[in-house]
Amino acid sequence: MKPHFARCWLLPPLLAALAAAPARALGPAEVFAQVSPSVWRVQTLDRDGLLLGQGSGVVIAPQQLVTNCHVLAKARRVQVRHEGQGQALPARLVLWDPPRDLCQLSVDGLTAPAVPLQPTPQVAVGQPAYAIGHPKGLDLTMSAGLVSSLRRNDASQLVLIQTSAAISGGSSGGGLFSDQGALLGLTTIASVTADAQNLNFAIPADWIADLPRRHAAGQAALAAARAGSAASK
Amino acid sequence: MNPAATGVMCRLSPSPTPHRGLAAPARGPRRWAGLLPLVAGLGVAGCAAPQLGADGSLPATVPRYSAPPLGQPSARLLLRGSVPPGERYALFRLEDAQQCQRPQLVTEGGGPLPAPLPVLVAADTLTTLDFIVLRPGNAGCAVRWSFTPKAGRSYLVQGVALPAGCTARAVDVTAPDRPVPVPDALLRTAANQRCLPLAQSRPMNESSLIQGGQLGGEAVLNTRATAQDLQGLIAP
């Protein structure tokens, strides 16, 4: 009986230790297998239905996908597609926050799984980072690197996650993922200059969680401004 | 520091965009000029460079700039450049800031010249400047922009000669360890246009994305971004 008692006594701290331990890091192939179904190509069309531009987007909730607003600039229609899927799915812009370059699309019939968001305070410089997107129209391209730095504004608020994971034109709105498959941010800006290498940037995932609130606030301010303008006429 | 603009040699095509957003337009690239502090963004400059003399000096006939009288509200203007041996750089102020007319040499550097001394410019007055790379017997390269200096502030114009052009940036260095983009700087040059009307000029500091900003106390990437470009997708 005594040994059995000892084992029971040890169990709670053991479980607590296991719960506190970080989950096993996934290999790059595992990360890709886990999250790539959630990374879609975003295509914009002009008034005449001609292709205007393209970027990437990440599924963050059922039938909801986020991308950079600049991907959608000047578009009249937007659609998303995924490798191996024959037909593009039409999408609707439902939330937007241009100052953060963050837009959310609603896509009927989108069955892709949502990825979890990594709370930004948990992002650490030096942790592995994987970028997945559709650069140059190359479907589901993955690159590996690190979180290189956390870029802040003058008020010391986080603005961008800097990464050494390679990204290129068309990656806008793609995902920067942790080695747990959580979304660190949306790849947004790349450095393409002769004297700089691997200087790439993603807007933080916390901004995605914040999008509905900021969108609503923006719309309320707009409505108030319109009402004020109408009243003054 | 944040970038300002890239100029090109007058006879050459625009230089590549150093940094950009990552959307891949089907028709021509979307360019976010210069997103890093390290280099400048895209701008296109016209030929405004006077020919150098055989010794590489500017002709004495080039009108010289006169600083505002002492006691008048003014800002400090500094110039730094990096050019290959045999080339020089200079800063011109356009007396007619609106129409980009009547250039006046503010200061110059490069070659055997020491680093240019700071000069004063009138505050609260629209000011149009050209950063110019001077190449003997060759087309020059210029970047032109306008802004309104604020009294008591210091502005640095920093330019670099590139094989296919030049870059220049204008930053507020009033706090030298925390240079910031000049908020109202407008790039006046574009492809084949040497003096864009102010209303058509694009803000230089749209290129300062990696420094971001703040709106209503919250962090944002671009304080000037609006939903204007999304109107085609916003349901009424």
Image (tube, coloured by chain):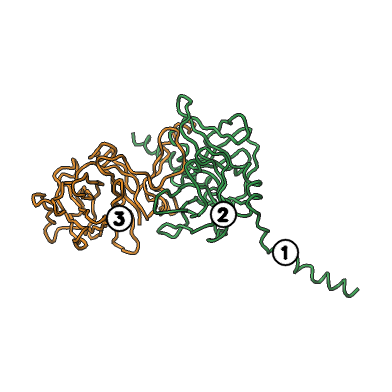
> Nearer the observer, disc 2 or disc 1?
2
Which residue type carries mark 2?
A: Ala
Q: Which of marks 2 and 1 is nearer the N terminus?
A: 1
Looking at the image, residue A108 sits to the left or right of residue B29; the answer is right
Looking at the picture, does residue B230 appear above or below residue B167? above
Q: Residue furthest left?
A: B61
The quarter of the displayed image where residue B30 is located? top left
Q: Which residue is drawn at 23% across and 40% down?
A: B194
- On residue A18, which mark appears? 1
Q: Position of residue B66 (x, y in %)?
A: 11, 55
For the residues beneath circles 2 and 1, the answer to whether they share a chain is yes
**Secondary structure of the residue carrying numbered label 3:** strand
Q: Where is residue A74 in the image (x, y as percent from the top left)?
A: 43, 33
Which residue type carries mark 1?
A: Leu
Q: Which residue lies furthest to the right in this view?
A: A1
Which residue type carries mark 3?
A: Val
**Secondary structure of the residue carrying numbered label 1:** helix
- On residue A137, which mark appears? none
Whole-angstrom CA distance, mark 2 to mark 3, is 33 Å
The quarter of the displayed image where residue B172 is located? bottom left
Looking at the image, residue A170 sits to the left or right of residue B72; the answer is right
Callout 3 crowding tier (Cα within 10 Å): few <14, some 14–19, many ≥20: many
Chain under disc 3: B
Looking at the picture, does residue B79 appear above or below residue B145? below
